[in-house]
Every structure is written in structure tokens, then in C-alpha cells.
Amino acid sequence: MTTEKRNRWMINVVLILAVISFIGFSIIPLIEGALTASQTPKASPSPSQTASSIPNREQLQKQAEGYELVLQREPDNQTALRGLLEARLGMGDVKGSIAPLEKLVKLNPNQTDYAILLAQAKQQLNDLEGAAQTYRDILKVKQGNIKALDGLTTLLLQQKRPEAAIGLLQDTLKTAPKANQIEAGSVDVPSVQLLLGRVYAEQKRYDEAIAMYDEAAKSDENDFRPVLAKAIVLKAQGKTDEAKPLFNSAANLAPAQYKDQINELASSSTSITTTPPSTAPTPTSVPASP
């Protein structure tokens, strides 16, 4: 792996470990796994496979048809809508997931996970404007929703619009004090600072990234995320001696499930070839019933 690719990999791990871990929801697209599964050739079943395990897609299709019949009679039946969504995602039918998702979003305006999933589905179908608008609709109601901020930031970066991503996050931070005065905790300032630091780091604006991580660290001295983020950026710059104590500190502060990953990052050499760890739910996951 080239130095450029290695550095980009290390910086992007910030999103996986340093941001996602404490917000309880992965912004790595939930749809992506379903799409990949639908495009991957299926191996021939081995003689040891049971008959019931072979026609999985056929079973899912029958389930989908059953839910569709229920919805013809009861178009607002949320159990059927969630079942249809799960079945279609299980078959890798991303396009088919749009209709039940849009209905679930309409029926559950205060449950944003459905809208997040809808935005991700649109993004996978290359409806980038539709995905962006869905994220923005969430942010109009809940301007500090970290899931929507993360999703829209990632989308803007994919569209090569880093200044738009920076502006979005800077504006959120500017209005955060007033928003939190009206509703305490409505904007998670450290998490937004981490997202902004990530954008700076990806643009190789390393000094600004580190300054943002330092600001995030002031909120909670026991939060491992900004410590880890700063260590990753320093290492990406080749400042391994400065990064080492920060990796050690991040590992000490982090929950047990992240310690091994942090230690791996700290000890990795210039020949890193590891794929970043994913904390994404399975592609068939849908938000729990309200």
C-alpha cells in the first residue's frame, strides 16, 4: 500500500472508531451490504447444506408477497412495512426498499433512523440530491442530529465539496450554544468537532484538525475519541514519536472492545494492508418498533 493510501486509511479510521463508537449508530451505509450481497455470485450449495437453507431468496420473496397483501388491506400497518423492508433488503433489493421506507418515515416523523436509512438507500441508488435532501430534512427539525450530520458530511465529501461540509459543521457549532440552551443536549458539540476535525484531516489541513481535536478533548478528559483522532493524524504525518503516547492514552481510556483496534493502529508499520474495522449493523437491520 502506498504512503498516500495508508495515510488516508488511517485518517478515515477516525470516523469508524473516534466518532461512531459513542453515538450508538453507525453511519457506514446500512444498505451497502445488501447491495453487495445481491451482486455477489452465490456458490453452489454443498451436500451438507440442508434443503431449508438453500431457497433463502425464494423464502424472502414469499414473505415480501405476503406483506404486500397485508399492505393492500392495511397500507399503514407498520409491522408489515418493516417486514417488507427486511425481506427486500435481505434480497439485496435496494430500490424496492424505498417505498416502505418512505411510508415508515411519514408514519414516524420523530424516529429519525428510518429517514437515515432512506437517505442511505437513495445514496446507494445514486440519487445523491435525494439523499442530501433527506439528511437536510432531518436537520431542519433536529439540527444537532449527529447521524444526519455525519451522513450529509460524508455525502458532501464524496461529491468533492469539502467547503460545503466544513460550512455545515461550523454553522452547527456556532448555533449549538443557543440550541442547547433551548433544549439541553440537542447538539453533541464534541462529536460535531470530531466530524469537523475529520474533514480538515482529509483535506490535509492537519493543524486545523488537531486544533479541533484539542477543543473536543476539553469537554471530557476521559473521552478517548479526540485523543485517538489526534494520534492518527500525527502518525499520518510521520510524527510517530508524538503519536505514541496519545495512542497509549486512548487505549487506556477506551472501552474494552476498542483497545485491540487502537493498539493495532499504534503498532502498524508503513506496510499496513488491513481494512478498517466496521461497526455497521447487518444490512437487514431496521429501526426497532417505536
Image (tube, rainbow, N blue to C red):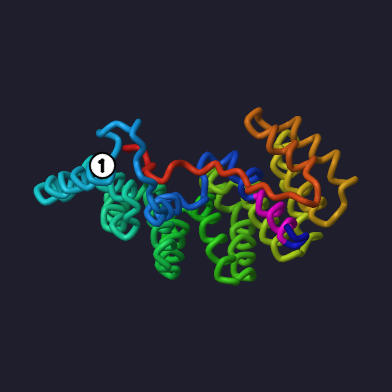
Q: Secondary structure at mark 1?
A: loop
User: Quick one: 137 or 154, which is closer to the camera?
Assistant: 154
Q: Is residue 55 left or right of residue 132?
A: left
Foreground residue among 11 and 116: 11
* Residue at horizontal 39 percent and vertical 46 percent from the top: 43
Prevailing secondary structure of the magenta residues: helix
Q: Is residue 100 magenta?
A: no
What residue do we see at 77% from left, 51% from top? 271
Q: Quadrant of the N terminus?
A: bottom right
Left or right, 31 with reference to 154 = left
Q: Position of residue 169 (x, y in %)?
A: 61, 60
Q: Quadrant of residue 128?
A: bottom left
Residue 135 percent across, percent down from the top left: 45, 60
Mark 1 sits on what residue? 55
| Dot 1 amino acid type | Pro
Q: Residue 252, percent across and down?
A: 76, 30
Task: Relative to 161, say whether 245 is above or below.
Answer: above
Task: Answer with the quarter of the image where residue 236 lies.
Answer: bottom right
At 59% across and 58% down in the image, what residue appears? 172
Whether residue 160 sits left or right of residue 117 in the image: it is: right
Please report the residue visible at 40 percent of the width from the left and 49 percent of the height from the top. 112
The segment highlighted magenta reads 5-14
Inspect this view and state whether residue 284 appears.
Answer: yes
In this rendered view, identify the residue nearer to me: 223 or 45. Answer: 45
Of residue 43 and residue 275, the one placed in the foreground of this image is 43
Residue 145 visible (yes or no): no
Is 131 located above or below residue 239 in the figure? below
Task: Report the residue that reaches farthest toward the front.
Answer: 47
Q: Position of residue 141 (x, y in %)?
A: 43, 55
Neighbours of disc 1 within 10 Å: few (<14), some (14-19), many (20+): few
